[in-house]
């Protein structure tokens, strides 16, 4: 969701940094990018690795939520360019759609409803619904199961390394839709393709389908 169909990653970066700085931790964009889509237990460990064992994840997290909620209440959120059009066309063409997100269920529904995107998804799977969140494969395995499909029958769209690792290790056909950064040498081998925005996804789907038929 975040960074793929919603233009919210820039807000997470801004308010994680502001919240951490409020408590005296010198967090910057690279720290935040490293925990994108990462389940909380993994994020806690990584941030303590940066800032020491005394890093108060929960205080910083709650401050981030407070600041971001205040901003969104005033300014709203934006969908990524082409999100509505792509989801609409996929539904019209009979694709099953699942959302696999690290975001909490209530926030996920609120964000999607506010932009009219909630209606497109057959299933929504959040990190709280599986044993281990991203970068572990559980959430994509659950998404495939909920759609009654094998993981290799599913194309996963991801913007972050943690999400890419999750989808790829689950066995999905994994496509990166870059948001705040480009694919690294670490994740390139895990990718079927890299989309030039959501408007490019249909091309990739057709290519994947052509390969499947061979």
Image (spheres, rainbow, N blue to C red):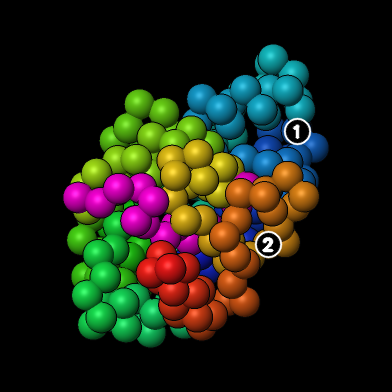
Position above or below: 21 against 45: below
Circle 1 Cα neighbour tier, 10 Å, few/some/many (<14 / 14–19 / ≥20) = some
In which quadrant is the C terminus drawn? bottom left
Give x and y (percent) for residue 108: 34, 54
Q: Residue at point 68% right, 22% down?
A: 48
Circle 2 Cα neighbour tier, 10 Å, few/some/many (<14 / 14–19 / ≥20) = few
Query: Which is nearer the eye, 105 or 75?
Result: 105
Question: Looking at the image, which residue sits at the far top?
Answer: 53
Give x and y (percent) for residue 25: 75, 33
Give x and y (percent) for residue 124: 27, 52
Magenta span has 52?
Answer: no
In which quadrant is the N terminus drawn? bottom left
Q: Dot 2 corresponds to which residue?
A: 180
Element at label 2: loop
* Gap in angstroms between the C-alphas marked 2 and 1: 22 Å
Q: Residue at point 29% right, 35% down?
A: 129
Question: Looking at the image, which residue sits at the far front?
Answer: 214
Give the mark nearer the N terminus: 2 vs 1. 1
User: Splitting the image into 4 quarters, where does residue 50 fall?
Assistant: top right
Which residues, given as a range, are shown in magenta?
Answer: 148-161
Q: Is residue 15 left or right of residue 95?
A: right
User: Splitting the image into 4 quarters, where does residue 86 fall?
Assistant: bottom left
Q: Dot 1 corresponds to which residue?
A: 25
Magenta span has 157?
Answer: yes
Query: Which is nearer the eye, 191 or 10?
Result: 191
Position above or below: 47 against 52: below
Q: Residue at point 39% right, 51% down?
A: 152
Element at label 1: loop
Query: Which is nearer the eye, 21 or 214?
Result: 214
């Amino acid at each position: 969701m975040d960074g793929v169909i919603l233009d919210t990653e820039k807000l997470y970066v801004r308010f994680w940094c502001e919240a951490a700085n409020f408590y005296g931790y010198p967090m910057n964009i690279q720290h935040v990018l490293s925990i994108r889509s990462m389940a909380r237990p993994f994020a806690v460990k990584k941030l303590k690795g940066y800032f020491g064992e005394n890093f108060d994840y929960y205080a910083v997290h709650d401050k981030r939520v407070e600041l971001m909620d205040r901003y969104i209440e005033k300014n709203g959120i934006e969908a990524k360019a082409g999100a509505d059009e792509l989801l609409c066309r996929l539904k019209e063409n009979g694709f099953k759609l699942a959302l696999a997100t690290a975001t909490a269920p209530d926030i996920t529904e609120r964000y999607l409803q506010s932009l009219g995107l909630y209606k497109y998804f057959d299933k929504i799977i959040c990190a709280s619904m599986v044993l281990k969140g991203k970068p572990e494969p559980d959430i994509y395995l659950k998404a495939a199961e909920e759609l009654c499909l094998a993981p290799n029958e599913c194309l996963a769209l991801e913007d972050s390394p943690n999400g890419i690792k999750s989808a790829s290790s689950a066995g999905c056909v994994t496509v990166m839709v870059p948001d705040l950064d480009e694919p690294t040498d670490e994740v390139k081998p895990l990718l079927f393709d890299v989309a030039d925005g959501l408007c490019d996804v249909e091309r990739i789907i057709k290519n994947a389908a052509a390969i499947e038929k061979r």
